Amino acid sequence: MDLGSILQYLVSGLTVGSTYGLTALGFTIIFNATRVINFAQGEFVMLGGMLAVFFAGALNLGVFPAVLLAVSCTTLVGVCMERLTIRPVQGANVVNIIIITIGVSIFIRGVVMLFLGKDTFSLPPFFGTEALEFFGAMIIPQSIWILLITMLVLVGLRTYFNKTIFGKAMLACSFEQKAAHLVGISVDRMIMLSFAISALVGSIGGVILTPITLTSYDVGIMLGLKGFAACILGGLGNPFGAAAGGLIIGVLESFGAGFISSAYKDAFAFIILLVILFVKPSGIFGRADIERV
């Protein structure tokens, strides 16, 4: 196989893997704040793409206004989810809360199917459609946008958690909620903020990927599962590991489809996950928990 084909698979894998990484980041942000796996995270990704298509078409908005409005609305959905479904059962068994997130996922998917239909939709590329040649590989401008926006999101989140008072408060809650509460941090507010940021990040992943892969009411299921696989692969609770896990799964998935068969493309993420769990259950970048007895 020539260099051009290898680079083509690499770029394709990084493009899709960026969305997996953003989805995994959403899982990580909520897990760090609540110790709960939010299985509605994939629906935030779906909502970003579907709402952007709706606002661009039905309201006749341009691509960028539609994207901004879609991301804002999805972030609001994340806040509403926390206030209406998670906060009322705060303190309940973690398994019960996880089941609630699954129910929210089904509800969101059903509402979108009811109002926007079962069709597949597309969103115009952000800037141009003419592919650029790079050592024999053809790179479309949208792929470059996806990689750039993903990097900006990662830098923004790192800055937020390391430099801002709200970010540090969220980190404090992730380590010990009782201690954070004792020093005056509103734990409830931080949990709500974690859902908002998770929905924001997920919706960004949805809107940047839609011009390439199209979208529909049910795409969140697979994106959510692959994002969860990326989260586990990189180490549950590790934001850097979540992003890296998404890129790794995307690249391996792309090469697997090219070298083996595209028919098994969706299975590669879970095969990789199973192998990692057998070899290193804490994930590539995770650390094994040590409990004193």
Image: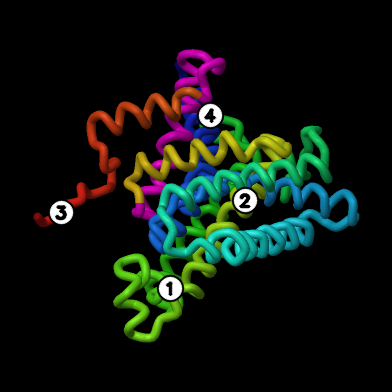
Question: Looking at the image, which residue sits at the far bottom?
Answer: 184
* Mark in front: 1 vs 4: 1
Colour treatment of the image: rainbow
Give the prevailing secondary structure in the magenta stretch.
helix
In the rendered image, residue 261 lying in the magenta stretch gets the answer yes
* Alpha carbons under labels 4 and 3: distance apart: 45 Å
| Label 2 crowd bin: few (<14), some (14–19), many (20+), radius 10 Å | many
Q: Is residue 280 left or right of residue 207?
A: left
Question: Residue 74, how many percent across, how many down?
Answer: 67, 58
Which residue does the numbered mark 1 point to in the structure image? 167
Which residue does the numbered mark 3 point to in the structure image? 291
In primary-sequence order, the first of circles 1 and 4 is 4
Inspect this view and state whether residue 85 appears. Answer: yes
User: Is the residue 215 above or below the residue 79 in the image?
Assistant: above
Secondary structure beneath disc 2? Answer: helix
In primary-sequence order, the first of circles 2 and 4 is 4
Q: Is residue 207 left or right of residue 22?
A: right
Question: Residue 280, how many percent across, how many down?
Answer: 23, 36
* Alpha carbons under labels 2 and 3: distance apart: 35 Å
Q: Which region shows up in magenta?
A: 237-266
Which residue does the numbered mark 2 point to in the structure image? 44
Whether tag 2 and tag 4 are in contact, CB under 8 A, the answer is no
Task: Inspect the image, locate mark 1, and give the three-letter code of the amino acid beneath it.
Answer: Gly
Question: Residue 283, how many percent across, how many down?
Answer: 29, 41
